Amino acid sequence: MPLPVVRTVADLRAQVRAWRASGLSVGFVPTMGALHEGHLSLVRVARGKADRAVASVFVNPTQFGPNEDFDAYPRDEARDAELLEAAGCHLLYAPAVAEMYPQGASTTVTVSGVTDPLEGAARPGHFAGVATVVTKLLNQCGPDVAVFGQKDFQQLAVIRRLVADLDIPAEIVGAPTMRADDGLALSSRNAYLTPEERAQAPALHQVLQALLQSLRDGESVAAVESLALDALARAGFQKIDYVEVRHPATLERLGPGPATGPVRVLAAARLGRTRLIDNVGD
Ligand code: AMP
């Protein structure tokens, strides 16, 4: 049976209301489509936590910078719907831009602090777009549980922050990063990689893993960050936005000496026209 699709807030709410009236709980997985096994793993987590799973596919224009890939971003709703159905999803919410941002929409959700470094520094305005669309999606769907990937580790921290600050009654679950056999984190943007770049790309994860191991061996944060930067450049990455050791909850910078407590190591770098991000931790 094809997956039911709704395109309006009213239709989404009607379905969620009907489930609730039958005593069913609701899990929610927001995505931008071009789905892969990483997204589908989130659907499976949502299914394990709730009776019904809703996924959204919305390529959110407000989280793309003016020179980013909004127009080029891969879109294939029919394929996405098939994959979601096979993963046990019950409903696809695929609103048009005008449904999400009707004429006159003037409110932006900005989270301070945790949005400042890393992706926030490299992509000005990105997290305001993310925070606004996620707040809207959570208000539209009203799920018991919403599942996000650790692949976008800082985004997950931003969402935890806004849900706490705005008293949004949904449990936020972070799910592990799904990877190809060679370690490359699955991403819709991997489709941009040429075969040569695809062969180079797993170095990002390898460098992060090696960095983490050196930290565990007692090396200083400053030394391992600097070595990782060199290693990424040698592996063919051209524009390395950051490779940094940070606190997993606050995302505050650690070091320069050895790290004593829990850490998250995050990086963003470019291979050709593709910007890749990844992170590893304890
Ligand atoms: P996106 O479609 O890229 O906006 O991602 C939608 C959701 O899927 C976000 O919560 C991402 O963190 C998550 N996600 C993306 N890639 C992966 C992956 N490789 N493993 C697990 N979750 C992922």
Image (cartoon, rainbow, N blue to C red):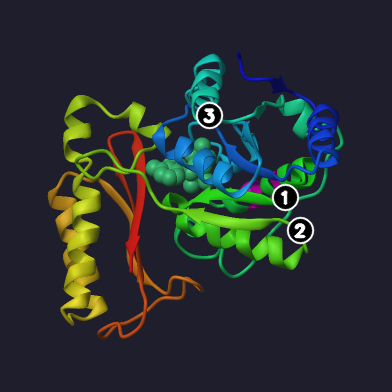
Badges 1 and 3: C-beta atoms under 8 Å apart? Answer: no
Q: Is residue 87 above or below residue 260?
A: above
Across and down, in percent, residue 131 comes to: 66, 52
Which label belongs to residue 135? Answer: 1
Q: Is residue 272 above or below residue 257?
A: above
In the image shown, does 250 or 178 lie closer to the viewer?
A: 178
Residue at (46% x, 57% y) in the render? 153
Across and down, in percent, residue 19 comes to: 79, 36
Which of pointers 3 and 2 lies earlier in the amino acid sequence? 3
Q: Is residue 122 among what the camera can see? A: no
Using residue 108 as the reference point, say whether residue 122 is left or right of it: left
SS class, disc 1: helix
Whether label 3 lies within 8 Å of ligand 1 gets the answer yes
Residue at (79% x, 44% y) in the render? 23
Using residue 106 as the reference point, say whether residue 24 is left or right of it: left
Q: Based on the picture, tell me whether residue 252 belongs to the magenta stretch.
A: no
Amino acid residing under circle 1: Thr
Across and down, in percent, residue 161 comes to: 64, 65
Amino acid residing under circle 2: Ile
Residue at the disc numbered 3: 33
**Identity of the residue furthest to the front in this view:** 22
Amino acid residing under circle 3: Gly
10 Å crowding of disc 1: few (<14), some (14-19), many (20+): some
Mark 3 and mark 2: span between their CA atoms?
A: 24 Å
Which label belongs to residue 168? Answer: 2
SS class, disc 2: loop
